[in-house]
Amino acid sequence: MATIGRNSAIAEIGRLRLRGFPGWVLWGIAHVYFLIGFRNRIAVLLNWTWAYVTWQRGVRLITGAQI
């Protein structure tokens, strides 16, 4: 499985090959499934849904002591 972008991914499981939106949905389901704990799954699912609906990008910060 590989995600290419919004609504676009490639998923190949045995003979099953999905691309585009169906592959992207399967990619998301697989990633949420392998999270540990029900609370984590719900939190990620809600965060991803909100980001998808609002077109907002996540904040990517690296903080720490500078050398």
Image (cartoon, rainbow, N blue to C red):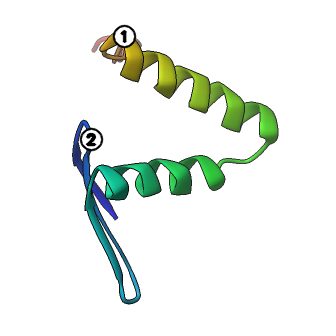
Q: Compared with residue 57, is residue 43 higher up or lower down, i.e. above or below?
A: below
Residue 29 at x, y percent in the picture: 54, 51
Amino acid residing under circle 2:
Asn
Q: Residue at x 34, y 65 (%)?
A: 1
Q: Which residue is drawn at 36% across and 13% down?
A: 59
Please state which of residues 60 and 67 is positioned toward the viewer in this rendering. 60
Residue bearing the label numbered 1: 54
The image shows a total of numbered marks equal to 2
x 68%, y 38%: residue: 41
SS assignment at label 2: loop
Estimate the x, y position of residue 66 in percent, counting from the top left: 30, 11
Residue at the outermost front position: 22
Query: Is residue 13 rendered to the left or right of residue 6?
Result: right
Q: Position of residue 17 (x, y in %)?
A: 31, 76
Looking at the image, residue 29 sits to the left or right of residue 36; the answer is: left
Q: State which quarter of the image contains the C terminus.
A: top left
Residue in the picture at 70% in, 31% down: 42
- Give the alpha-carbon distance from disc 1 to disc 2, as whole Å: 14 Å
Measured as percent of width and height from the top left, residue 34 is found at 63, 55
Vertical arrangement, residue 43 with respect to residue 7, above or below: above
Is 32 left or right of 9, judged from the image as shown? right
Report crowding for label 2: few under 14, some 14 to 19, many 20 or more residues within 10 A (C-alpha).
some
- Check disc 1 and give the amino acid type: Thr
Q: Name the residue under label 2.
A: 7
Q: Which of marks 1 and 2 is nearer the N terminus?
A: 2
**Mark 1 falls on what kind of element?**
helix
